[in-house]
Image (spheres, rainbow, N blue to C red):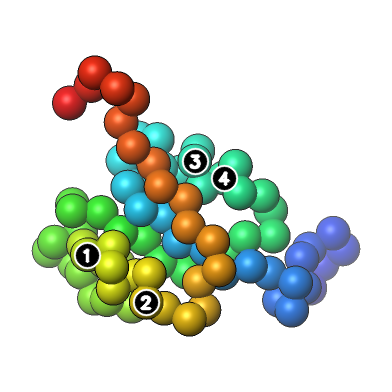
C-alpha cells in the first residue's frame, strides 16, 4: 500500500444505483474512502451477475458488505 492510500480496514463498501452520465460523479462525491463493490442499472440486463452488476436494486441492498449507496437520477424534466 502506498503513502496516502486508504487501508482496507478503513474503506467503506459502496454501491451505485443509476450508472448513466451522472453516476460516476455522484459516486465520486462519497469520498476517497468508499470502494465501489457493486453497480445497478437497467442497462446491465445482458451482463447482470448479481455479484458486481445488478438490474434489481433490491438484491443489491440485501448485501451485508455495502454500507453506503449513491443513487444517480435524471434531473427533473429530462427523459
Q: Who comes first in sequence, dot 3 or dot 1? A: 3
Q: Which residue is mark 3?
A: 26
Q: Which residue lies under the disc numbered 1?
A: 56
The answer to whether marks 4 and 3 mark residues whose Cβ atoms lie closer than 8 Å is yes
Q: Earlier in the sequence, mark 2 or mark 4?
A: 4
- Mark earlier in primary sequence (1, 4): 4
Quick check: marks 1 and 2 in contact, CB under 8 Å? no
3D distance between C-alphas at marks 2 and 4: 22 Å
What SS does tag 2 mark? loop
Q: Is residue 52 visible?
A: no
37 left or right, relative to 35: left
Observer-nearest of 11 and 5? 11
> From the viewer's perspective, is the residue at label 1 or at label 4 nearer?
1
State how far apart marks 2 and 3 are (Cα): 21 Å
> Which residue is located at x 18 percent, y 52 percent?
43
Query: Tag 1: Cα neighbours inside 10 Å, few (<14), some, or many (≥20)?
Result: some
Which mark is on residue 62?
2
x then y, percent, for residue 56: 22, 64
Label drawn at residue 28: 4
Q: Contact, CB < 8 Å: mark 2 with mark 4?
A: no
Cα separation between marks 4 and 3: 5 Å
Taking depth in this image into account, of 21 and 66 the one nearest to the observer is: 66
Q: Residue at x 40, y 35 (%)?
A: 22
Amino acid at each position: 500500500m502506498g503513502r496516502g492510500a486508504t487501508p482496507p480496514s478503513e474503506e467503506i463498501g459502496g454501491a451505485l444505483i443509476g450508472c448513466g452520465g451522472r453516476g460516476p460523479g455522484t459516486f465520486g462525491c462519497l469520498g476517497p474512502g468508499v470502494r465501489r463493490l457493486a453497480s445497478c442499472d437497467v442497462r446491465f440486463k445482458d451482463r447482470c451477475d448479481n455479484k458486481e452488476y445488478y438490474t434489481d436494486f433490491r438484491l443489491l441492498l440485501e448485501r451485508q458488505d455495502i454500507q453506503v449507496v449513491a443513487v444517480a437520477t435524471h434531473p427533473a424534466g429530462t427523459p
